[in-house]
Image (cartoon, grey):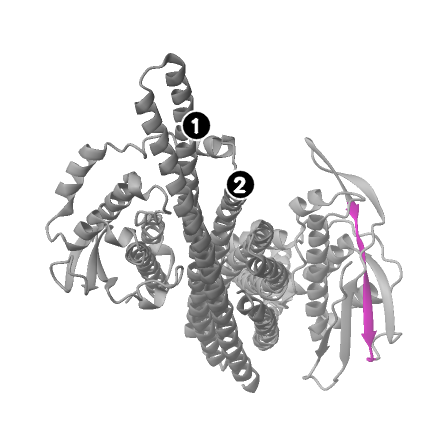
Amino acid sequence: SSKTLRSVSVDLNHDASLLIDIPDALCERDKVKFTVHTKTTLSSFQKPDFSVPRQHEDFIWLHDTLVETEDYAGLIIPPAPPKPDFDSPRDKMHKLGEGEATMTKEEYTKMKQELEAEYLAVFKKTVQVHEIFLQRLSSHPVLSKDRNFQIFLEYDQDLSVRRKNAKEMFGGFFKNMVKSADEVLISGVKEVDDFFEQEKTFLLDYYSKIKDSTAKAEKMTRAHKNIADDYIHISATLNSLAADDMTANKKNLEKLSDLFEKFRKVEGRVASDQDLKLTELLRYYMRDIQAAKDLLYRRARALADYENSNKALDKARLKSKDIPQAEEHQRQCLQKFDKLSESGKKELTSFKGRRVVAFRKNFIEMAELEIKHAKNSVALLQGCIELLKSN
Amino acid sequence: TLRMLTVGIEEEEGGDSFDIHISVSDPEKVGEYMMLFSSTHNLSFSVFPFMSLLQTSISLFKRNEFAVKRRFSDFLGLHSKLASKYLHIGYIVPPAPEKSIVGMTKVKVGKEDQSSNEFVEKRRSALERYLMRTVKHPILLKDPDVLQFLESSELPRAVSTQALSSAGLLRMVNKAADAVNKMTIKMNESDAWFEEKQQHFENLDVQLRKLHTSVESLVCHRKELSVNTAQFAKSAAMLGNSEDHTALSRALSQLAEVEEKIDQLHQDQANADFYLFSELLGDYVRLLTAVKGVFDHRMKTWQKWQDSQMLLQKKREAEAKLQFTNKPDKLQQAKDEIKELEGKVQQGERDFEQISKTIRKEVSRFEKERVKDFKTIIIKYLESLVQTQQQLIKYWEAFLPEAKAIS
């Protein structure tokens, strides 16, 4: 179950009117089929309790339609879940197969177990991140009411047909724009509002820093995993030494081998806990900050549109031509911009609160787990030292 | 600055109980000189003499506590002398540390950089372990060359030190092994003990090499973890500076500090991984080479005895033939040769019995020593791991209230 893993975002899935979870998922040839389960008291849905199978591409479709919806321009659209990526454990499994001849049967079995655990961890992470995406939507006052969201949750046939049609409709308008223009546009726009000026400076800087931290945290985790793997080999060789030993030393070697086997499991858990509580946390908020930047971008575009509409109105007045249309256009642009600014301010403020709460929760959990694992390690090590000394 | 490592030993068997503490410390740069390794390379490096401080209460030595200056080549010279005296009669002479050309070229004159410090420390530690193993051997300790090495203020410069590095020893052993294989008469091993032991050491060698490789990998990954942790700490500090929420910013800075401290922990642990675990295994891989060497010498001794016996047989046959000819001078010569050969055969048999006896004793001593050595050092190593984990608990317990303080 993914309940224990739900940690990078908090305060989700508490509103009983719409509860969503992904209770299970199937992995076939690296393609993941998620079971999306909905429990609702809302009359807009046909049934109170139902499940549908969904693929990753369905989630992307949903995300993109939300991004493309004009009405949501003033909202932070929750970041799309990344594609399930089994490359790392798959490559390692391949390498392990090639190196099978160089290790004992026991060693090979243990390494295989480790890799299967890694597969499982990737699997659990991808389920978690897809689940959180949906729960962000269901807990949002506006987005939870989206028609496509409802279709996603309810439509009991293959969504891929509908997806294709939708693509033709929208044509990927927003997405196909050159994303690199974002930064230029956002920083180039003359900002009148102090709040947005500060947010802009903050988000641009924070994004690059958190991106760096995510990468560095990942490297730390990988080094921990490598150490755990070394302990497997050490344990296996000690076991071979014990098997060959006919003296009283045999018992010592067995104890030592056993210690390293247990120790490596702890190290493995340290690595995976750090991965979940630190690396995944940073990674998630990196993507969330990108979504916030996208909001700023849309607002900047709206401001640019408004400024253009002013120029157009001046031109119309000069030429005394089409003044009412130009006035109407200008009024609409201003309205849109104001709406975006108002909504954006609310979204960015609650975003900060959400981020702080999530960091707090994960840092506390990470520290507690590190302490737990270290205490466990001390007990294991001291136990072995006692046994060795007593012999 | 380099630490002084004191290792104490106690000799239990053989009646005399005594204490010897040896430490090798305080390398100084005496000077530099050029050394030609090949026609295309001129490598210059500093020569580090080491002081060997000996505290002892036994009467073998003239004083109780004294220190002498020695060069690396002096250690090699000592080993070369001991190997030439004792290996061929069955004593397991501890091999001297490797002459690492790669390490030497990294050492820059006058420059105190980390890699040259590391190299010096590795060498110092290796020399200390080498000396300790040598003096723990009851026979070697009494050898005049050893006593001179430990006591004399001045040593004559060692002449040829190339041949008896560990690599050189391995080459010698392999040559002996090839010679053994070429023997036309296969030795009929009447004593199953030797066959069993040889197989045992073969297996042990394979496993220890494998273990050594894994531990070397561990050292490498631990160093990587240290570097990555330091980098993350810096990154977290920058993130903390960027964070506009005050309490969270503070917590991120605290996290960066914790990770920086943890980086130091990993560095220290990597040193323990290396100096305790990895070097132990490396030493025993090299020691097993010496063990294999004595077994091969026994084969050679046996071969020599057999050769003498075959020659004696031939001479006897020749003498028998001469009985029927009228050549009294030749007959007398033959009888003299036979007498000499009979002496040689007897000596050959005695030598073979002696080396077999010596090896049995040596192997027993070696195995006891090995088990004790491993246990002592492994316990030390495990204790280093305990220390690291206990420090981790301290650091994270200090961080926890900081994390809870975020509001």
Magenta stretch: includes residue A376: no
Give the camera-side residue of A325 and B191: A325
Residue A124, quarter of picture: bottom left
Depicted B100 relative to depicted A3: above or below: above
Q: Is residue A337 left or right of residue B363?
A: left
Residue plotted at (29% across, 52% down): A142
Residue span colored magenta: B46-58
Q: Are marks 2 and 1 on the same chain?
A: yes
Give the camera-side residue of B301 and A344: A344
Residue highlighted by disc 2: A197
Label 1 sits on a secondary structure element that is: helix
Helix, strand or loop for the magenta stretch, by majority: strand
Query: As shown in the figure, which amino acid type bears the numbered disc 1?
Result: Glu
Output the chain of dot 2.
A
Report the disc number at residue A307: 1
Give the camera-side residue of A330 and B266: A330
Q: Are marks 2 and 1 in contact (CB under 8 Å)?
A: no
